Amino acid sequence: MPTVLRIKGFKFWFYEADLDEPPHIHVAKAGKEGKFWLEPIDLARAGRFKPVELREIKRIIQDNHEFLINSWNTELSKRANR
């Protein structure tokens, strides 16, 4: 479960078991956990986040999209090399 980004108290990570799914990121803060698809960027699961928090998370993902996609691909390549 590599954490790839921490911004404004939000933690973003991938679950290794989820790498068979389309690219996505999990996000948590203050006991809440959600999930966003990365291509295209879209909410997969709100996880008790409020709409204002979801907008902030989406903005963070948009601002860091290239980094997150590269991180996803790096995790996939690690898995393929095992």
Image (cartoon, rainbow, N blue to C red):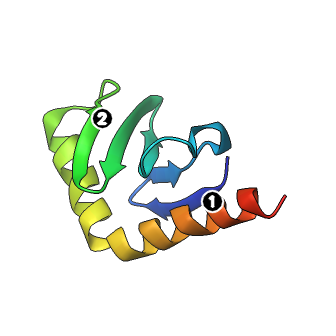
Q: Mark 2 or 1 closer to N-term?
A: 2
From the viewer's perspective, tell me whether residue 17 is left or right of residue 30: right
Instruction: In this rendered view, identify the residue nearer to me: 31 or 45.
Output: 45
Q: Indicate the quadrant containing the C terminus: top left, top right, bottom left or bottom right.
A: bottom right
| Farthest-out residue, front | 80
Residue that label 1 marks: 76
Instruction: In this rendered view, identify the residue nearer to me: 24 or 5.
Output: 24
Tell me the kind of residue under disc 2. Ala
- Report the residue at 16% width, 49% height from top: 55
* Quarter residue 53 falls in: top left
Residue 23 lies, with reference to residue 35, above or below; the image says below
Residue 56 position within the rendered picture, expressed as x and y whole percent measured from the top left: 22, 53
Residue that label 2 marks: 44
- Report the residue at 53% width, 61% height from top: 72
Residue 15 position within the rendered picture, expressed as x and y whole percent measured from the top left: 61, 42
Q: Residues within 10 Å of mark 2 (few under 14, many from 20)?
A: some
Tell me the kind of residue under disc 1. Leu
Q: Residues within 10 Å of mark 1 (few under 14, many from 20)?
A: some
